[in-house]
Image (cartoon, rainbow, N blue to C red):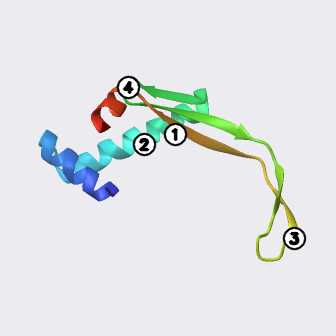
Amino acid sequence: MTKQMLVNYIAEETGMTKADATRALDAMMNGIVKGLKEDGKVTLTGFCTFAAQEKAARKGRNPRTGEEVTIPARTAVSIKAGAKLKDALN
């Protein structure tokens, strides 16, 4: 499902206009990003938990040349499905 398909679904389910549904979805995504930056974790009870994880710099290898390269430190996001989401899929 693409973002536009999700916007259309939200608009149909709630009676919102597509513009309002787009703003609502954008606000939710921005809220998740803000929560990860400030708290490092966002929990949508029963649905999923987003967690920011710091990854240290490490050595890697260029597969084409075999040359060793340094992969810089970064912040990665992990997503863990909640019970309601798991139940809905199974």
Q: Residues within 10 Å of mark 1 (few under 14, many from 20)?
A: some
Q: Check if mark 1's residue and mark 3's residue have beta carbons within 8 Å.
A: no
Q: Earlier in the sequence, mark 1 or mark 4?
A: 1
Residue 16 position, x and y percent, is: 16, 44
The residue labelled by disc 2 is 29
* Location of residue 47 with respect to 4 vertically, above or below: above
Measured in 3D between alpha carbons, the distance from the residue under mark 1 to the one under mark 2, in whole angstroms, is: 6 Å
Amino acid type, label 3: Glu
Q: Which residue is mark 1?
A: 33
Image: 82 above or below 62: above
Q: Is residue 75 left or right of residue 7?
A: right
For the residues labelled 1 and 4, the Cα–Cα distance comes to: 23 Å
User: Which one is earlier in the sequence, the residue at label 3 or at label 4?
Assistant: 3
Given the image, on which type of amino acid does mark 4 rest? Ala
Locate the N terminus by quadrant. Answer: bottom left
| Mark 2 element type | helix
